[in-house]
Image: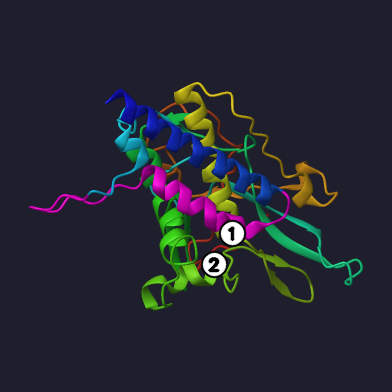
Amino acid sequence: MDELNSYYKDQLIDQLESLIELCASYDSGNFTRAKGMSAIIRTMVKDPIPRSGKKSDTVSLLKTLNIKDDMKFYNTAYEAVDPEFMFNLVGFVTVPTKNVKEHFALEHIYLPVFENSTQVDCEWLDFENWWTAKVLVSKSESKNIILSRKDIVLRLAEQFGGVHVDEVKAGNRDYFDLVTSRYSILTHVTKEQQEAIKYLPYALVRQIAHEVIVSLKNKLNLTIVYNPTNKNNLRGIPESNIRQPGMFSESTKAYSKHTKKPFRLAKQTVIKSPPNAAYVKLFF
């Protein structure tokens, strides 16, 4: 049994080292490496849904090692009770385009926040609360998008290139629109036009990978080198230019689902809209 545990631990460390390599590639400008990250995270944490009379041989590495249920997962998000809008894990920034032929051209991208999140309710959570917490909420007249880490990782892994590419249908169209930047929740607005902010699912998965790496290094007391950075992807722009939108909610629905004393909370502003307002437009 000790021999098997040693084998499984070696497999987990191999997966972790591969995840760190993919993160380094993302941090060097290869945003689609998030697909590979989603596949590795899936291997580490996804277990089958129990079905009556059936037992699956495919279980997560963390479950096989018997550490999934008692370990804590690093959390860089804030889950409010019932927000209208809530943006965790990532921020947005305008940077010079990578296309050297387009002199002075700019593009608007999402990037992970790493340790700079403006809103964190609990620094550590058990797996289920971490995995299923709503980290992205955008309710509007045209689309309601509500995503947990589970949704973000497994959709990219199982439907959009991590381990499988599914046919695009009504049930996964919203995520397809996010992956392809046909819809980006936030837009960059100028006097002339509105432009999509790109790479949202990839940035979300990169931040989730960051949380997983910190969690496993903490649990297993590992000294594996891991140096997350946005420096290359900012292309000369200061990191302070990354803006995390935060949250918009009725005051009674803005409380954390996990604690009465948040670890970190952004400055709050009270907005009183006219009683006959049909919608609220937010500018950041």
Left or right, 130 with respect to 188, comes to left
Q: Label 2 belongs to which residue?
A: 178
112 in relation to 96, above or below: above
Q: Nearer the viewer, residue 275 or 160?
A: 160
Q: Whole-percent x and y of residue 107?
A: 76, 64
Q: Is residue 45 magenta?
A: yes
Q: Is residue 282 visible?
A: no
Mark 2 and mark 1 in contact (Cβ < 8 Å)?
yes
Q: How many marks?
A: 2
Left or right, 57 with respect to 87, comes to left
Left or right, 210 with respect to 284, comes to left
Start and end of the magenta stretch? 28-56
Which quarter of the rendering shows the N terminus?
Answer: top left
Amino acid tagged 2: Leu
Amino acid tagged 1: Leu
* Residue at 46% in and 55% down: 152
Q: Nearer the viewer, residue 48 or 123?
A: 48
Residue 200's disc number: 1
Q: Whole-percent x and y of residue 74?
A: 48, 32
Label 1 residue SS: helix
Q: Is residue 66 visible?
A: yes
Q: Whole-percent x and y of residue 17?
A: 56, 38
123 in relation to 269, above or below: above
Q: Whole-percent x and y of residue 11?
A: 43, 38
Q: Nearer the viewer, residue 25 or 87?
A: 25
* Residue at 77% in and 43% down: 239
Neighbourhood count class around disc 2 (C-alpha, 10 Å): few under 14, some 14–19, many 20 upward: some
Which quarter of the rendering shows the C terminus?
Answer: bottom right
